[in-house]
């Protein structure tokens, strides 16, 4: 298959992205993948590194090949800079600006398709319905798939127009693929064919039999002190009442949060506790080292309409390392219920205590291995082929 993945996520970055992981594996399965990178605006342009600026302006080739094993081919296309539009409240103005932006996009994508000799292309639009709608039928594609991995109304950059454009774009596609049953339930309102391919894990990366030679440093940790940890953004999805109860109840434990803090208010709220340590965002290659040092891993999300569609990437990362996971019941968990400690409110404290007493187990690793990204890519491939 020849796939054009018109992605919202940038190819590079300090966190794992399901779109990037799936496209890498689809290329490994022998397909040709053109990954259309995040559309940076002219405002973003000035904050980019020199080589990225040169690609955006076409001084360096916008098209670059990413090495993969086997017969597949993987390319990343850098788009020309576009006009900013997310600040616009008017749907008419927003759509007008994006229609203008779609013209150089269309030219760049079609040119890349010609250079690569791609035929009978399938467009996989990844959480980018604003441009999916503008470019539908204009890239010479034979089919369109909408890939939705989050609740679009909860995305701060897409909350104004995302839900409207998702409703408009989904019916223009042959099928919709989403990452959770919660999203599937919502998207079935707009399309009769909605499939679920849940988030996965780079099992080999997190299932390291021997800890990395240089583990990340846990500042001020005392010998023998139990570590309770969390990977991911520290934002308004977290239940801070549950977390603060944990910090007080397990006052002798060491809490480590690995991820970017979305606001200064949250930063101050967490740093008010002496046993809480925020270490910031780290590259994906560093994450297994952090998880190796955790005794209990947390997913303390609030339960609301926005989190109901989440299948968290971190759950299989934790399990691949053999670590016990304690989570709130924020969404349908399906088969995860057999391996994750689920609790809400004050019961969350007891669940953490139970998980800490149980410790690591190979059962978690056996479960996570079934959810490797390659298995997820095969499921994605099967839907595309059908």
Image: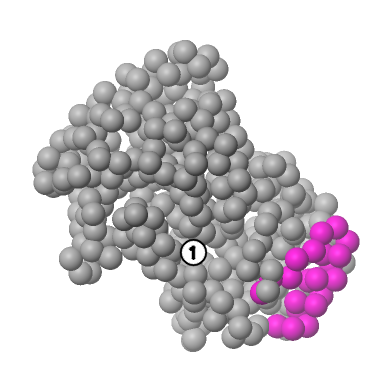
Judged left or right of residue 27, residue 98 is right
**Residue tagged by mark 1?**
200
The N terminus lies in quadrant: bottom left
Report the residue at 20% width, 29% height from top. 107
Query: Residue 346 in magenta?
Result: yes
Q: Position of residue 35 (x, y in %)?
A: 29, 47
Report the residue at 46% width, 49% height from top. 177
Is 261 in front, or is 150?
150
Q: Position of residue 42 (x, y in %)?
A: 35, 26
Examine the rendered structure and indicate whether residue 325 appears above or below residue 98: below
Q: Is residue 216 visible?
A: no
The C terminus lies in quadrant: bottom left
Is 337 in front, or is 213?
337
Judged left or right of residue 217, residue 48 is left
| Residue 52 lies in quadrant | top left
Report the residue at 74% width, 83% height from top. 358
Examine the rendered structure and indicate whether residue 61 appears above or below residue 314: above
């Amino acid at each position: 298959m020849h796939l054009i993945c018109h992605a919202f996520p940038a190819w590079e970055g300090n966190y794992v992205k399901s779109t990037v992981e799936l496209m890498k594996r689809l290329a490994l399965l022998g397909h040709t993948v053109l990954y259309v990178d995040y559309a940076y605006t002219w405002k973003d342009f000035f904050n980019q590194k020199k080589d990225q600026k040169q690609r955006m302006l076409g001084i360096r080739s916008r098209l670059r090949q990413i090495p993969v094993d086997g017969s597949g081919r993987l390319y990343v296309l850098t788009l020309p800079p576009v006009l900013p539009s997310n600040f616009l409240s008017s749907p008419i103005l927003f759509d007008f600006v994006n229609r203008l932006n779609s013209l150089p996009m269309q030219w760049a994508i079609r040119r890349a398709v010609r250079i690569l000799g791609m035929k009978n292309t399938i467009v996989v639009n990844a959480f980018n319905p604003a441009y999916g709608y503008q470019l539908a039928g204009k890239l010479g594609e034979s089919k369109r798939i909408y890939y939705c991995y989050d609740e679009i109304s909860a995305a701060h950059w897409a909350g104004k127009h995302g839900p409207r454009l998702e409703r408009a774009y989904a019916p223009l596609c042959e099928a919709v693929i989403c990452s959770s049953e919660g999203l599937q339930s919502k998207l079935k309102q707009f399309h009769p064919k909605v499939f679920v391919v849940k988030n996965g894990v780079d099992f080999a990366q997190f299932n390291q039999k021997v800890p990395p030679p240089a583990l990340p440093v846990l500042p001020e940790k005392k010998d023998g002190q139990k570590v309770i940890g969390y990977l991911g953004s520290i934002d308004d999805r977290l239940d801070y009442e549950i977390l603060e109860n944990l910090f007080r109840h397990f006052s002798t434990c060491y809490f480590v949060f690995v991820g970017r803090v979305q606001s200064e208010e949250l930063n101050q709220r967490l740093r008010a506790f002496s046993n809480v340590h925020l270490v910031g965002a780290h590259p994906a290659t560093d994450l297994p080292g952090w998880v190796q040092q955790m005794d209990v891993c947390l997913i303390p999300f609030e339960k609301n309409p926005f989190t109901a569609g989440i299948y968290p990437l971190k759950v299989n990362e934790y399990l691949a390392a053999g670590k016990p996971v304690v989570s709130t019941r924020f969404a349908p968990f399906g088969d995860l219920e057999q391996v994750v400690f689920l609790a809400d409110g004050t019961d969350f404290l007891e669940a953490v205590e139970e998980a800490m007493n149980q410790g690591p187990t190979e059962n978690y690793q056996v479960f996570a291995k079934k959810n490797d990204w390659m298995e997820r890519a095969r499921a994605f491939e099967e839907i595309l082929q059908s």
